[in-house]
Structure formats: structure tokens, C-alpha cells
Image (cartoon, rainbow, N blue to C red):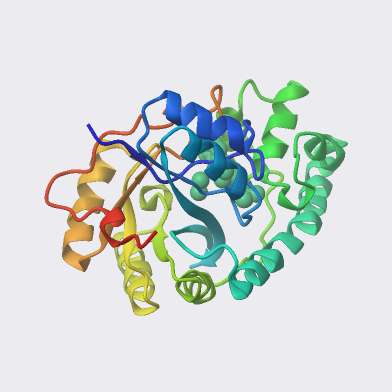
Amino acid sequence: MFIADLHCHSSASDGLLAPAEVAARAAANGVDMLALTDHDDLGGLAKAREVAERSGVRFINGVEISIEWGGLQVHIVGLDFDMGSEALNAGLASIRSGRISRAQRMSAELEKIGIGGCFEGAMRHSENPSLISRSHFARYLVEIGVSKDVRSVFESYLVPGKPGYVTHHWATLSEAVGWILGAGGIAVVAHPGRYKFSRLEMRNLLDEFAGCGGQAIEVISGSHSQENVNQFSRLAREYRFLASCGSDFHGPEESYIDLGGTPALPSGLTPVWTAFSS
Ligand code: AMP
Ligand code: MN
Ligand code: MN
Ligand code: MN
């Protein structure tokens, strides 16, 4: 069976393994085609590619861009783009530049409920300071015993309506899709089943995404239920989107699904890799 994993993270963003370890683990798990999709950063791609290709795994450049849409944070994956694109690199740098001040605001909010030292604590968990994320805060909150695991942190903290959440201005949908297309890549709506949108809002998102030149959605994701898979298979057919597939692996202890562990794409969909040029 052909195994593609087109969504995962390394320590270049909020994953637990180094880019080389992610590529080696994917190879050991039998992955045939791998894209590393760190949040807002391309720093892990060169090393992951080197190790993947040495192990006989086809490697695809990837990134997961943080945007704001409909008042919520949405993620747009870019695949198979030119890493040297100046507009893409400048756009990603602009997103990263807001993360440290956001983290300071998150830390101040947690301080108000008596949990101190979160900025410094989260920073100790982040190898890439400009990529400080809620995942690093979550790991610190587990470390100091506030929650038993990362999943529980996101039930009680760091999400809208809970302590430690702050609003933030990310990129827009059209900016993110524009940067990906401008770099010759394919834009993909990441894990659409995770967003708390009504059916109408989801259609509005997909309409606007298609209008910007977006071509694909993740039908299979480590965070999708069977119901999500069915729903987004239908929408992929209706919108004539290419279908993508990825584990969203962050690390051995934090992810239910390992690299390459997702089920195959449902038949009748057009896999996103049919449109890759590299
Ligand atoms: P940020 O980009 O700083 O907003 O952090 C978002 C990251 O937090 C995501 O990429 C996930 O890795 C993690 N995350 C968000 N929600 C959850 C959740 N419910 N359970 C586990 N991890 C989550
Ligand atoms: Mn993440
Ligand atoms: Mn995501
Ligand atoms: Mn992800």
C-alpha cells in the first residue's frame, strides 16, 4: 500500500522530534511520501529532505500557515512550493514576529489566575523562540502539574473563553493562499473538522478559499472522526478539491496517530499529489 503523510511537525515549530528524526521515523514506519509542515517556518525542510531522500522517501516541501478567519484561528497548509520564494518567506516572518508579544500577553493572563512564570517556562520548551506556541505553554503547564497532559490543558486553558487565551492578528486567508500560490505550491485547508464553524460558515470558508485559488482540503487527518471523513469527502467532490492526507503528528507521546498511521484516502477522490510538480 502507498503511504503518504503530508502534515506533521518537528522541533522547528511545536513538534517534539528534530526534523531529521521525523524523517527517519517516517521512513521506519513505511511512509512513501512525506511533507514536513511546521507552523509558519521553513527551517526544518532542508534537513528533513536530506534524511528522507537518503532513506528512499519522496519529500515534499510543506508549511502550515496560521490565519484568522471568521474570528477564529484557521490553518492553511502549503505543499510543493519553492522554498526560496521571497514573498512566502517574508510573509512567514511577519507571522512569527507577532508570536513573542502574544506569548507575553498569554503569560500575563495566566499570571492573573495565579500561574506565574509561563513565558519563561514555555520558552524553555521551544527550540525556536520565534515559534513560541500554545503547545509550549501546554507542555509547561503539564510540567508544573496544572494539568495531567497536553490534551487536558486544551480543555481548561489556552482556548477561547478559558484562561490564557488571547486574541491575535494572524495573516488573512487571501494572504496565505497568495504566498503559497506565488511560490508555485498548492494550498490546502488543514483539518477542516477541527473548526467550530456552522455548516454555512464552513461553506463560506471553502467558497472564499476556492475564490483565492485554493485547490485542496485535508479529508484524512489525525484529528478527523469517521463522520468528518465522510463530510469532507462529500465537500471535496462537490467543490472539486484535491484531497490531502496527514497525521498532524507532533511527537510520540502527544499524538494518537503516528507518522504514516492514517487510513488511505476514500476512493473516488483525486489525491493532492497528482498535482505535484516536484
Ligand atoms: P498556536 O499556533 O500557538 O496557536 O498553537 C496551536 C497548536 O496548539 C496547534 O498547532 C496544536 O499543536 C496545539 N493544539 C491546539 N489545540 C489543541 C488541542 N485541543 N489538543 C492538543 N493540541 C492542541
Ligand atoms: Mn501544532
Ligand atoms: Mn493545525
Ligand atoms: Mn499541524
The extreme front residue here reads 54
Q: What is the x, y in percent for residue 245? A: 33, 45
Locate residue 115: give its quadrant: top right
Q: Nearer the viewer, residue 78 or 97?
A: 78
The extreme left residue here reads 268
The extreme bottom residue here reads 211
Q: Name the quarter where the N terminus is drawn.
A: top left
On the picture, is 37 further left or further right than 233? right
Indicate whether 261 appears above or below 45.
above
Indicate whether 42 appears above or below 203.
above
On the picture, is 90 further left or further right than 220? right
Indicate whether 10 appears above or below 140.
below
> Which residue is painted at 39% across and 65% down in the image?
186
> Which residue is painted at 56% across and 42% down in the image?
50
> Which residue is painted at 60% across and 49% down in the image?
46
Residue 250 in sight in this render: no
Locate residue 175: give its quadrant: bottom right
Q: Name the quarter where the C terminus is drawn.
A: bottom left
> Which residue is painted at 52% across and 49% down in the image?
37
Locate residue 250: give its quadrant: top right
Q: Nearer the viewer, residue 78 or 108?
A: 78
Q: What is the x, y in percent for residue 235? A: 22, 59
Residue 6 in sight in this render: yes
Q: What is the x, y in percent for residue 109? A: 79, 48
